[in-house]
Amino acid sequence: MSYKDYAQQQHDRIYGVQIHDEGIIEQMNDELAQECVDGLKNLDIYNYPQPINMEVSLLSIFCGLYGIANESIRAEGKKNIRQFNKLSANADKNCGQASSNGERKPNPWILTKILRYHNKDYYEQIIKPLLKKNYEVKKQSKIVDTVKQIEKHEIDLKYQFTLIDVSSKALNGKYENKLELVAQDLLRIIKAIPCQNGWCFIIKEYDCIAGKNTIKYKNKTALYDQLRSIRLWQDGKKHITAIDALEQYHSLFEKIGMKFTSNNEGIFSVFQGFKYMQLDEVDQTKIDKFLGLVKDTISGNDERVYEYILNWFSFIVQNVGKKTETAITLKGLQGIGKNVFTNVLCELLAGYSSKNITDIDDFV
C-alpha cells in the first residue's frame, strides 16, 4: 500500500465511519448532502454493480440518494442522473428497477465514496473538508454530552483519595478506556486557577508528617510530571495518560481564583472545614479539666480574662476567615501549662494552625 493510500485509509477511518455500533446508519446533514448531489456530474454510469472503486453503478447511486433525508435534495439528485451524466444502454433501460432496489438499501455515505474515486478533485476540494467539519462537530457534541454526565466533584480533604488511587485504578484497567471517568476522579484531587504566567494548580496530597491530606500548589511542569506517569492505555503508538483527561476536560477543573473561604462556587476555598465535627450533645466532664487550666492558670483566676479568652477562640471558630485583630501573649513560669493550652487550640484548628515554636530555627 502506498503512503497516499494509507493516508486516505486513515482519513476514512476517522472521518468517514458513519455507522454506529448498533448498526444504525447516521443521517447526512443537508449541507453535505447538497454538495454530494452537486458533485454527481460528468460520470459514466453502468447498470451492473461493480466495486465502487472500479466504476459507478446505478444501484450505488440510488442507494446513496435514497439515504438523503431531505426530499428536495434527493429529488434533485435523481433528476440529475440523466441530465448531467452518461448512462450505458443497459443502465438507461433499467433505471426504474435500480431505483426500486436502491430504495431498499439507503446509505447516503456511498455518495462520498463514489466522488472519492470518480470525481477526485471535487472530493478533495469540497467533500473532504466537509467530512472533517462534520466529524469535529460530532466530536464536540459528544464531549458536551459527556461533560453533562461527569460528576462535578470538589476537593474534600477528608475523602481519602489521591493520585496514587488514580494510578492504581489505571493499572487495574478500571477506567475502561474512558477519559471522562479519569477526569471525574481527577476532579476530586486537582483544580486550576489563572496565574500571571498561565495556569497554577491546586492538588490534594497526603502529608506523611501531618498524617492527613493537605492542599499543595504546583506549576504546570510539576503537575504534568506526575500526571504523565499515570499511563491509562495505548492508542496506536501514543500512550494516553492522565494529562489527556485533564486537557480534554480542562474547563471543569478551572476556578476563577482562590480565597481562604468563599461561598462562590467559582472560587476555590482553601478552608475545607475543621478536623473535628460539632457534637449535638456535649460531655462536660471531658473538657472540665482543660477549662480549669484556662481559668486557673492561663487567666490567673480572673473571670473577665477567662470569659474573654473563651469568646476570643469561639469567634475564630464561628467566623471562619474573619480576623479577631487580637494576639494573646502568655507569660509565666516554664511547665505551668502554656503549651497544653496552645496545643489544644492548634489541634482543634488542625490544618490551619502551626505548632508552638520553641526554636528560632523553626522560623526558617
Image (cartoon, grey):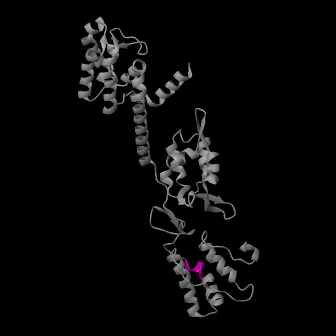
Rendered position, 156 above or below 149: below
Magenta segment: does it hold 285? yes
Residue at 25%, 17% in the rendered image: 83
Q: In the visual, does 297 lie left or right of 267?
A: right
Q: Quarter holding the N terminus?
A: top right
Q: Quarter holding the C terminus?
A: bottom right
Across and down, in percent, residue 296 comes to: 64, 90
Rendered position, 185 above or below 73: below
Magenta segment: does it hold 202? no
305 or 71, which is in the foreground? 71
Rendered position, 347 above or below 109: below
172 or 321, which is in the foreground? 321
Q: Is residue 162 visible?
A: yes
Across and down, in percent, residue 74 comes to: 26, 25
Residue at 46%, 51% in the rendered image: 151
Residue at 62%, 82% in the rendered image: 290
Q: Is residue 22 visible?
A: no
Across and down, in percent, residue 66 comes to: 29, 22
Across and down, in percent, residue 98 comes to: 28, 13
Q: Where on the picture, by quarter, is residue 340?
A: bottom right
Q: Magenta region's main secondary structure?
A: helix
Which span of residues is magenta-colored? 283-288
